Image: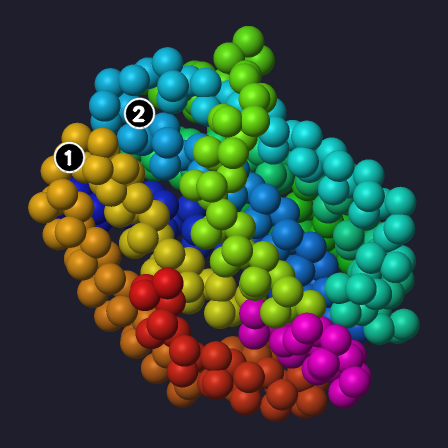
Amino acid sequence: MPKLILGLAAPTILSMLITSIYNLADTFFVGQLSTSASGAVGVVSSLMAIIQALGFMLGHGAGGIISRSLGSQDTHAATKFASTSFFTALTFGAVLAVLGLAALPDFMMLLGSTDTILPHACAYARPILIAAPLMISSLVMNNHLRFQGSAAFAMVGITIGGFLNVFLDPLFIFQFRLGVAGAAYATILSQFVSFCILFCMTRQGANIPIRFRNMHPSWPILKEIVAGGAPSLIRQGTQSMSTIFLNVAAGGFGDAAIAAMSIVTRLSFFAASVIIGFGQGFQPVCGFSYGARKYGRLREGFWFAVKAGTLFALLAAAVAIVWAVPILGEFRNDPLVISTGAQALRAQAMTFFLVPLT
Protein backbone atom coordinates (compact mmCIF):
# COMPACT_ATOMS: atom_id res chain seq x y z
CA MET A 1 0.00 0.00 0.00
CA PRO A 2 2.76 2.58 0.76
CA LYS A 3 4.35 1.86 -2.62
CA LEU A 4 0.99 2.30 -4.41
CA ILE A 5 0.20 5.58 -2.65
CA LEU A 6 3.69 6.96 -3.23
CA GLY A 7 3.44 6.04 -6.91
CA LEU A 8 0.16 7.94 -7.20
CA ALA A 9 1.27 10.76 -4.91
CA ALA A 10 4.59 11.52 -6.64
CA PRO A 11 3.11 13.04 -9.84
CA THR A 12 0.42 14.75 -7.77
CA ILE A 13 3.02 16.28 -5.44
CA LEU A 14 5.01 17.43 -8.44
CA SER A 15 1.87 18.99 -9.95
CA MET A 16 1.08 20.77 -6.69
CA LEU A 17 4.66 21.99 -6.36
CA ILE A 18 4.67 23.32 -9.92
CA THR A 19 1.38 25.13 -9.27
CA SER A 20 2.86 26.58 -6.11
CA ILE A 21 6.08 27.52 -7.91
CA TYR A 22 4.33 29.59 -10.56
CA ASN A 23 2.30 31.31 -7.85
CA LEU A 24 5.60 32.06 -6.12
CA ALA A 25 7.03 33.23 -9.46
CA ASP A 26 4.27 35.84 -9.73
CA THR A 27 5.02 36.95 -6.18
CA PHE A 28 8.78 37.06 -6.79
CA PHE A 29 8.80 38.97 -10.08
CA VAL A 30 6.00 41.37 -9.16
CA GLY A 31 7.81 42.00 -5.88
CA GLN A 32 10.67 43.52 -7.88
CA LEU A 33 8.35 46.34 -9.02
CA SER A 34 7.16 47.84 -5.75
CA THR A 35 5.69 47.01 -2.36
CA SER A 36 2.21 48.05 -3.51
CA ALA A 37 2.47 45.80 -6.56
CA SER A 38 3.53 42.93 -4.31
CA GLY A 39 0.50 43.63 -2.12
CA ALA A 40 -1.75 43.37 -5.19
CA VAL A 41 -0.72 39.73 -5.59
CA GLY A 42 -1.90 39.12 -2.03
CA VAL A 43 -5.24 40.79 -2.68
CA VAL A 44 -5.88 38.82 -5.88
CA SER A 45 -4.77 35.59 -4.19
CA SER A 46 -8.15 35.51 -2.44
CA LEU A 47 -9.80 35.66 -5.88
CA MET A 48 -7.59 32.75 -6.94
CA ALA A 49 -8.74 30.90 -3.82
CA ILE A 50 -12.38 31.42 -4.88
CA ILE A 51 -11.57 30.01 -8.32
CA GLN A 52 -9.82 27.04 -6.70
CA ALA A 53 -12.73 26.49 -4.32
CA LEU A 54 -15.16 26.15 -7.23
CA GLY A 55 -12.76 23.95 -9.20
CA PHE A 56 -12.00 21.66 -6.27
CA MET A 57 -15.67 21.39 -5.32
CA LEU A 58 -16.66 20.20 -8.79
CA GLY A 59 -13.46 18.20 -9.36
CA HIS A 60 -13.40 16.43 -6.02
CA GLY A 61 -17.17 16.00 -5.92
CA ALA A 62 -17.32 14.37 -9.34
CA GLY A 63 -13.92 12.68 -8.95
CA GLY A 64 -14.96 10.71 -5.89
CA ILE A 65 -18.06 9.48 -7.71
CA ILE A 66 -15.99 8.64 -10.80
CA SER A 67 -13.50 6.52 -8.82
CA ARG A 68 -16.27 4.68 -6.95
CA SER A 69 -18.13 4.09 -10.21
CA LEU A 70 -15.03 2.70 -11.90
CA GLY A 71 -14.35 0.54 -8.84
CA SER A 72 -17.83 -0.98 -9.21
CA GLN A 73 -17.49 -1.23 -13.05
CA ASP A 74 -20.14 1.43 -13.75
CA THR A 75 -18.48 3.30 -16.64
CA HIS A 76 -21.73 4.97 -17.73
CA ALA A 77 -22.10 6.82 -14.42
CA ALA A 78 -18.43 7.85 -14.47
CA THR A 79 -18.82 9.31 -17.98
CA LYS A 80 -21.97 11.20 -17.03
CA PHE A 81 -20.49 12.81 -13.94
CA ALA A 82 -17.22 13.73 -15.68
CA SER A 83 -18.90 15.66 -18.51
CA THR A 84 -21.52 17.29 -16.29
CA SER A 85 -18.97 18.63 -13.81
CA PHE A 86 -16.73 19.94 -16.62
CA PHE A 87 -19.43 21.99 -18.34
CA THR A 88 -20.76 23.17 -14.98
CA ALA A 89 -17.25 24.48 -14.26
CA LEU A 90 -17.25 26.48 -17.50
CA THR A 91 -20.60 27.98 -16.54
CA PHE A 92 -19.51 28.89 -13.01
CA GLY A 93 -16.34 30.49 -14.38
CA ALA A 94 -18.29 32.58 -16.89
CA VAL A 95 -20.67 33.84 -14.17
CA LEU A 96 -17.75 34.74 -11.88
CA ALA A 97 -16.00 36.58 -14.74
CA VAL A 98 -19.06 38.66 -15.65
CA LEU A 99 -19.89 39.61 -12.06
CA GLY A 100 -16.28 40.33 -11.13
CA LEU A 101 -15.51 42.49 -14.17
CA ALA A 102 -18.77 44.44 -13.79
CA ALA A 103 -17.72 45.75 -10.37
CA LEU A 104 -13.95 45.26 -10.43
CA PRO A 105 -12.75 48.20 -8.24
CA ASP A 106 -15.38 47.53 -5.57
CA PHE A 107 -14.61 43.81 -5.76
CA MET A 108 -10.90 44.43 -5.15
CA MET A 109 -11.65 46.74 -2.20
CA LEU A 110 -13.89 44.01 -0.78
CA LEU A 111 -10.96 41.58 -1.06
CA GLY A 112 -8.83 43.87 1.10
CA SER A 113 -7.14 46.28 -1.30
CA THR A 114 -5.98 49.72 -0.20
CA ASP A 115 -6.29 52.84 -2.34
CA THR A 116 -2.61 52.65 -3.33
CA ILE A 117 -2.79 48.93 -4.15
CA LEU A 118 -6.08 49.22 -6.07
CA PRO A 119 -4.69 50.13 -9.56
CA HIS A 120 -2.25 47.20 -9.39
CA ALA A 121 -4.92 44.82 -8.08
CA CYS A 122 -7.36 45.72 -10.88
CA ALA A 123 -4.64 45.32 -13.54
CA TYR A 124 -3.75 41.89 -12.14
CA ALA A 125 -7.30 40.66 -11.52
CA ARG A 126 -8.87 41.66 -14.86
CA PRO A 127 -7.10 39.00 -17.01
CA ILE A 128 -7.50 36.43 -14.22
CA LEU A 129 -11.28 36.92 -14.23
CA ILE A 130 -11.40 36.63 -18.02
CA ALA A 131 -9.60 33.28 -17.75
CA ALA A 132 -11.74 32.02 -14.83
CA PRO A 133 -13.76 29.51 -16.94
CA LEU A 134 -10.57 27.85 -18.21
CA MET A 135 -8.97 27.87 -14.76
CA ILE A 136 -11.92 26.24 -13.01
CA SER A 137 -12.43 23.60 -15.71
CA SER A 138 -8.69 22.81 -15.74
CA LEU A 139 -8.85 22.09 -12.01
CA VAL A 140 -11.84 19.83 -12.65
CA MET A 141 -10.06 17.85 -15.38
CA ASN A 142 -6.92 17.59 -13.26
CA ASN A 143 -8.92 16.00 -10.45
CA HIS A 144 -10.81 13.73 -12.84
CA LEU A 145 -7.53 12.29 -14.08
CA ARG A 146 -6.19 11.82 -10.56
CA PHE A 147 -9.30 10.05 -9.34
CA GLN A 148 -9.06 7.70 -12.31
CA GLY A 149 -5.53 6.78 -11.26
CA SER A 150 -3.95 8.82 -14.10
CA ALA A 151 -2.05 11.27 -11.90
CA ALA A 152 0.90 11.21 -14.33
CA PHE A 153 -1.35 12.49 -17.14
CA ALA A 154 -2.61 15.29 -14.89
CA MET A 155 0.98 16.12 -13.98
CA VAL A 156 1.94 16.72 -17.61
CA GLY A 157 -0.60 19.49 -18.17
CA ILE A 158 0.11 21.25 -14.87
CA THR A 159 3.90 20.95 -15.18
CA ILE A 160 4.12 22.35 -18.70
CA GLY A 161 1.84 25.25 -17.81
CA GLY A 162 3.86 25.96 -14.66
CA PHE A 163 7.23 26.08 -16.39
CA LEU A 164 5.75 28.26 -19.13
CA ASN A 165 4.47 30.73 -16.53
CA VAL A 166 7.89 30.99 -14.85
CA PHE A 167 9.45 31.74 -18.25
CA LEU A 168 6.79 34.24 -19.35
CA ASP A 169 6.60 36.24 -16.10
CA PRO A 170 9.86 38.20 -16.50
CA LEU A 171 9.29 38.47 -20.26
CA PHE A 172 5.86 40.10 -19.92
CA ILE A 173 6.59 42.12 -16.77
CA PHE A 174 9.99 43.59 -17.67
CA GLN A 175 10.73 43.00 -21.36
CA PHE A 176 7.27 43.99 -22.61
CA ARG A 177 6.91 46.56 -19.79
CA LEU A 178 3.42 45.39 -18.85
CA GLY A 179 4.06 45.57 -15.10
CA VAL A 180 1.63 43.76 -12.82
CA ALA A 181 -0.71 43.02 -15.72
CA GLY A 182 2.15 41.13 -17.38
CA ALA A 183 2.14 38.58 -14.56
CA ALA A 184 -1.58 38.03 -15.11
CA TYR A 185 -1.16 37.64 -18.87
CA ALA A 186 1.61 35.11 -18.28
CA THR A 187 -0.66 33.20 -15.91
CA ILE A 188 -3.65 33.02 -18.23
CA LEU A 189 -1.56 32.01 -21.24
CA SER A 190 -0.01 29.24 -19.17
CA GLN A 191 -3.46 28.21 -17.92
CA PHE A 192 -4.75 28.04 -21.49
CA VAL A 193 -1.89 25.72 -22.48
CA SER A 194 -2.60 23.54 -19.42
CA PHE A 195 -6.30 23.46 -20.29
CA CYS A 196 -5.59 22.22 -23.83
CA ILE A 197 -3.17 19.55 -22.63
CA LEU A 198 -5.48 18.31 -19.88
CA PHE A 199 -8.42 18.16 -22.30
CA CYS A 200 -6.35 16.01 -24.66
CA MET A 201 -5.23 13.81 -21.76
CA THR A 202 -8.83 12.97 -20.88
CA ARG A 203 -9.02 11.24 -24.26
CA GLN A 204 -5.85 9.18 -23.81
CA GLY A 205 -5.72 5.57 -22.68
CA ALA A 206 -8.66 4.34 -20.62
CA ASN A 207 -9.53 7.79 -19.24
CA ILE A 208 -13.10 9.08 -19.32
CA PRO A 209 -13.44 11.57 -22.24
CA ILE A 210 -15.32 14.87 -21.93
CA ARG A 211 -18.23 15.07 -24.37
CA PHE A 212 -21.13 17.52 -24.52
CA ARG A 213 -23.62 14.76 -25.29
CA ASN A 214 -22.75 13.06 -22.00
CA MET A 215 -23.67 16.12 -19.95
CA HIS A 216 -26.76 15.64 -17.76
CA PRO A 217 -27.22 18.82 -15.66
CA SER A 218 -30.14 17.48 -13.65
CA TRP A 219 -30.65 18.48 -10.02
CA PRO A 220 -29.96 14.96 -8.59
CA ILE A 221 -26.59 14.77 -10.39
CA LEU A 222 -25.54 18.32 -9.48
CA LYS A 223 -26.67 17.75 -5.92
CA GLU A 224 -24.50 14.64 -5.64
CA ILE A 225 -21.48 16.45 -7.08
CA VAL A 226 -21.91 19.41 -4.73
CA ALA A 227 -22.45 17.13 -1.73
CA GLY A 228 -19.26 15.23 -2.51
CA GLY A 229 -17.29 18.42 -3.11
CA ALA A 230 -18.72 20.43 -0.20
CA PRO A 231 -15.76 19.71 2.14
CA SER A 232 -13.34 21.02 -0.51
CA LEU A 233 -15.54 24.07 -1.11
CA ILE A 234 -15.68 24.81 2.60
CA ARG A 235 -11.94 24.31 3.04
CA GLN A 236 -10.97 26.52 0.10
CA GLY A 237 -13.76 29.00 0.78
CA THR A 238 -12.56 29.35 4.37
CA GLN A 239 -9.04 29.93 3.06
CA SER A 240 -10.32 32.68 0.77
CA MET A 241 -12.27 34.33 3.60
CA SER A 242 -9.28 34.16 5.95
CA THR A 243 -7.07 35.76 3.28
CA ILE A 244 -9.62 38.55 2.80
CA PHE A 245 -9.87 39.20 6.55
CA LEU A 246 -6.07 39.09 6.83
CA ASN A 247 -5.69 41.64 4.00
CA VAL A 248 -8.28 43.93 5.56
CA ALA A 249 -6.55 43.73 8.95
CA ALA A 250 -3.08 44.17 7.45
CA GLY A 251 -4.25 47.14 5.38
CA GLY A 252 -4.39 49.21 8.56
CA PHE A 253 -0.61 48.84 8.85
CA GLY A 254 0.15 49.81 5.26
CA ASP A 255 0.94 48.16 1.95
CA ALA A 256 4.08 46.49 3.35
CA ALA A 257 1.99 44.41 5.74
CA ILE A 258 -0.27 43.19 2.93
CA ALA A 259 2.79 42.42 0.79
CA ALA A 260 4.34 40.44 3.65
CA MET A 261 1.17 38.42 4.18
CA SER A 262 1.01 37.75 0.44
CA ILE A 263 4.49 36.25 0.42
CA VAL A 264 3.89 34.20 3.57
CA THR A 265 0.63 32.80 2.19
CA ARG A 266 2.34 31.61 -1.00
CA LEU A 267 5.25 30.11 0.95
CA SER A 268 2.90 28.28 3.29
CA PHE A 269 1.01 26.83 0.34
CA PHE A 270 4.31 25.66 -1.14
CA ALA A 271 4.97 23.61 2.01
CA ALA A 272 1.38 22.42 2.24
CA SER A 273 1.34 21.29 -1.39
CA VAL A 274 3.55 18.28 -0.61
CA ILE A 275 1.37 17.28 2.32
CA ILE A 276 -1.80 17.70 0.26
CA GLY A 277 -0.14 15.63 -2.48
CA PHE A 278 0.10 12.65 -0.11
CA GLY A 279 -3.60 12.99 0.61
CA GLN A 280 -4.50 13.28 -3.06
CA GLY A 281 -2.36 10.25 -3.84
CA PHE A 282 -4.52 8.38 -1.34
CA GLN A 283 -7.84 9.60 -2.80
CA PRO A 284 -8.07 7.23 -5.82
CA VAL A 285 -6.98 4.36 -3.58
CA CYS A 286 -9.74 5.36 -1.17
CA GLY A 287 -12.39 5.55 -3.91
CA PHE A 288 -11.46 2.29 -5.61
CA SER A 289 -11.09 0.46 -2.27
CA TYR A 290 -14.43 1.72 -1.04
CA GLY A 291 -16.14 0.86 -4.31
CA ALA A 292 -14.62 -2.63 -4.18
CA ARG A 293 -15.46 -2.96 -0.45
CA LYS A 294 -11.81 -3.48 0.57
CA TYR A 295 -11.96 -1.53 3.81
CA GLY A 296 -8.72 -2.91 5.26
CA ARG A 297 -6.73 -1.44 2.39
CA LEU A 298 -8.57 1.84 2.84
CA ARG A 299 -7.55 2.12 6.52
CA GLU A 300 -3.95 1.11 5.81
CA GLY A 301 -3.62 3.73 3.09
CA PHE A 302 -5.18 6.45 5.23
CA TRP A 303 -2.76 6.06 8.12
CA PHE A 304 0.26 5.87 5.83
CA ALA A 305 -0.73 9.17 4.18
CA VAL A 306 -1.20 10.84 7.60
CA LYS A 307 2.18 9.66 8.92
CA ALA A 308 4.10 10.62 5.78
CA GLY A 309 2.44 14.04 5.66
CA THR A 310 3.15 14.75 9.32
CA LEU A 311 6.84 13.88 8.95
CA PHE A 312 7.23 16.29 6.05
CA ALA A 313 5.25 19.00 7.89
CA LEU A 314 7.68 18.92 10.81
CA LEU A 315 10.66 19.20 8.45
CA ALA A 316 9.10 22.14 6.54
CA ALA A 317 8.28 23.91 9.81
CA ALA A 318 11.89 23.65 10.97
CA VAL A 319 13.18 25.16 7.70
CA ALA A 320 10.66 28.04 7.83
CA ILE A 321 11.45 28.91 11.44
CA VAL A 322 15.24 28.89 11.04
CA TRP A 323 15.53 30.64 7.65
CA ALA A 324 12.46 32.94 7.70
CA VAL A 325 14.41 36.21 7.26
CA PRO A 326 16.58 35.26 4.25
CA ILE A 327 13.59 33.58 2.58
CA LEU A 328 11.47 36.75 2.85
CA GLY A 329 14.38 38.86 1.65
CA GLU A 330 14.46 36.99 -1.65
CA PHE A 331 10.95 38.20 -2.52
CA ARG A 332 11.03 41.86 -1.50
CA ASN A 333 14.00 43.91 -0.31
CA ASP A 334 11.95 46.02 2.08
CA PRO A 335 12.91 45.92 5.81
CA LEU A 336 9.30 46.26 6.95
CA VAL A 337 8.13 43.50 4.61
CA ILE A 338 10.95 41.22 5.78
CA SER A 339 10.46 41.77 9.53
CA THR A 340 6.67 41.46 9.38
CA GLY A 341 6.76 38.49 7.03
CA ALA A 342 9.39 36.59 9.05
CA GLN A 343 7.26 36.81 12.19
CA ALA A 344 4.16 35.67 10.29
CA LEU A 345 6.00 32.80 8.56
CA ARG A 346 7.35 31.47 11.86
CA ALA A 347 3.89 31.62 13.40
CA GLN A 348 2.39 29.87 10.38
CA ALA A 349 5.05 27.15 10.50
CA MET A 350 3.89 26.20 13.98
CA THR A 351 0.62 24.98 12.46
CA PHE A 352 2.06 22.93 9.56
CA PHE A 353 1.64 19.67 11.50
CA LEU A 354 -2.13 20.18 11.48
CA VAL A 355 -2.38 20.05 7.66
CA PRO A 356 -2.15 16.21 7.34
CA LEU A 357 -5.05 15.88 9.78
CA THR A 358 -7.34 18.09 7.70
| Residue at the extreme front of the image, as rendered | 220
Badge 2 crowding class, 10 Å Cα cut-off, few under 14, some 14 to 19, many 20 or more, is many
Quadrant in which the C terminus appears: bottom left
- Amino acid type shown at disc 1: Arg
Residue 93 is left or right of residue 218, and the answer is: right
Residue 173 on image: x %, y %: 76, 54
Residue located beneath label 1 in the image: 293
Q: Residue at x 42, y 66 (%)?
A: 271
Name the disc covering residue 72, or none.
none
Q: Earlier in the sequence, mark 2 or mark 1?
A: 2
Residue 311 on image: x %, y %: 24, 70
Given residues 100 and 227, the one toward you in this image is 227
Q: Residue at x 69, y 45 (%)?
A: 186
When the figure is inspected, residue 296 is found, relative to residue 91, above or below; the finding is below
Residue located beneath label 2 in the image: 69
Q: Is residue 170 visible?
A: no
Given residues 20 and 353, the one toward you in this image is 353
The magenta segment is 245-265
- Amino acid type shown at disc 2: Ser
Calculate the distance from the C-alpha at mark 2 to the C-alpha at mark 1. 12 Å
Circle 1: element type: loop
Residue 178 is left or right of residue 266, and the answer is: right
Residue 181 is left or right of residue 212, and the answer is: right
